[in-house]
Amino acid sequence: MENPLPQRPYRRADHGAHVLVVEDVAVTREFLRRLLVDNGYRVSDAATGAEAIATLDEGLPDLVLLDLLLPDFHGLEVCRHLRSLEGGEDVPVLVITMDERPESHAEAVQAGVDDFLRKPLLPTELRTRVRSLIRLRHLRTELRRDTEAILTLQARKDELLQFVVHDLKNMLGTLLASVDLLGEGASPTEKRQRCRIEGTAKSMLGMVQNMLDLSIHEQAGLVPQPERISFATWIEQIRPELECITLRRNQFLELNVHPDLEVEADPQLFERVLFNLLENASKFGPKESTVRFQAEPLGSLVRFQVTDEGEGIPADMKDRIFDRFIRVDAHSSAHAGRGLGLAFCHLVTNLHGGRIWVEDHVPKGSRFLIELPLRFWELED
Ligand code: ADP
């Protein structure tokens, strides 16, 4: 029966690949050359180390077959030279040797050799090994190209993110300044409306800043700028903004801060940690409930707690919610959010040498706890 498929001559992927043979014994060199040419490879050869290096400097082959005992210097020098050239780390090196000692093999591997072939050479074994190593060469090159393409894309994406974030920050800054000009608001309703606008703009700003800081940390590492601050004074300064968070949902904010607590930390980063935790407590707590913040010394530690009266967090999610993009009910649109706030809190706490976790609040709700060691936070005598 006639074969319906078109008949094309089979062409191997390694056909025409360039092999450099480095071998000082003329008979062996000629044997290798003939065998490789007969199998469709392009072959250059070198009888000394110096010749091999000169050939490599002219252009990289797809594979080097290397004898180690050369008249001018040791064959591994050729391998080391190859590895020092741009793109040279992708070219496989197959050593042809009679030396079976493990220490010689270890030294060769250290110099960048990929594989060994024992003398006397068997043509079938040589062909198989050459073909596999040339495939390895192509895979390495492809991998490098793909990695570079991914890194370029990632850099472009980060750049775009930073432009967008920068512009959003400016716009939200203008919006907040305008809200400030409106004044406090005469009636309780006006005051609540003002808080609603201000709070929403601040939440957006917080989200944008979380994104920015997490991306900066990924690229270069976020570096806290610690200052010694009196915790009670600091909390009093930001109290109106904290109250704004809970006022939006008619909730009550209870602040309970030890009067002598002095802290050494980055105030800007910690202000946002506090905002993220209070925002969540308010967002996930019922209307007209109480959100509590407490800061106290605890032995050689300082402990913060943010407590709400919401639904709490399921046991199997308690660790996971500190990872990026994790939300307990990811499909719900009831609470806007992208799962970045707690990842940011986790990062900042870690950078200050502390830890953060969540527990159930009895009878209802969650309690987020942060503990920091005294080497970062100190108590007044
Ligand atoms: P976002 O709130 O922006 O989604 P977060 O990282 O702050 O991101 O929180 C991640 C998830 O953890 C939330 O989506 C929510 O499912 C859960 N969560 C956080 N805080 C609370 C809380 N106080 N009560 C209940 N669930 C919470």
Image: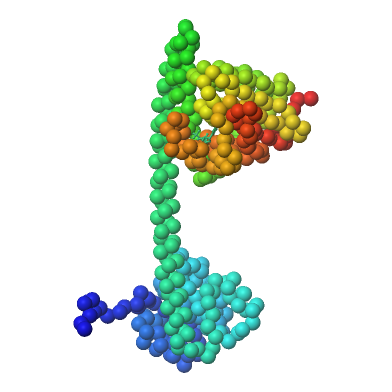
Q: Which of the image's four quarters has the C terminus?
A: top right
Asked where in the image residue 21 lies, by quadrant, the reply is: bottom left
Number of numbered discs present? Answer: 0
Residue 115 in view, yes or no? yes
Q: Could you say where residue 316 lies in the image, as x and y percent from the top left?
A: 58, 42
Residue placed at 39% from the left, 82% from the top? 43
* 189 with respect to 224 (left or right): left
Residue extending furthest toward the right: 381
Q: Which of the image's four quarters has the N terminus?
A: bottom left
Indicate how the structure is coloured in the image: rainbow
Q: Could you say where residue 184 lies in the image, as x and y percent from the top left?
A: 49, 11
* 9 with respect to 106 (left or right): left
Asked where in the image residue 320 lies, by quadrant, the reply is: top right
Residue placed at 51% from the left, 38% from the top? 328
Residue extending furthest toward the bottom: 27
Q: Could you say where residue 340 lies in the image, as x and y percent from the top left?
A: 50, 37
Q: Is residue 65 above or below residue 316?
A: below
Asked where in the image residue 73 lies, by quadrant, the reply is: bottom right
Residue placed at 51% from the left, 69% from the top? 83
Q: Could you say where residue 324 lies in the image, as x and y percent from the top left?
A: 51, 41
Residue extending furthest toward the top: 186
Q: Is residue 224 above or below residue 48?
A: above
Front position in the image: 12 or 84? 12
Residue 216 in view, yes or no? no
* 260 with respect to 165 (left or right): right
Q: Is residue 24 above or below residue 378?
A: below
Front position in the image: 137 or 73? 137
* 141 with respect to 374 (left or right): left
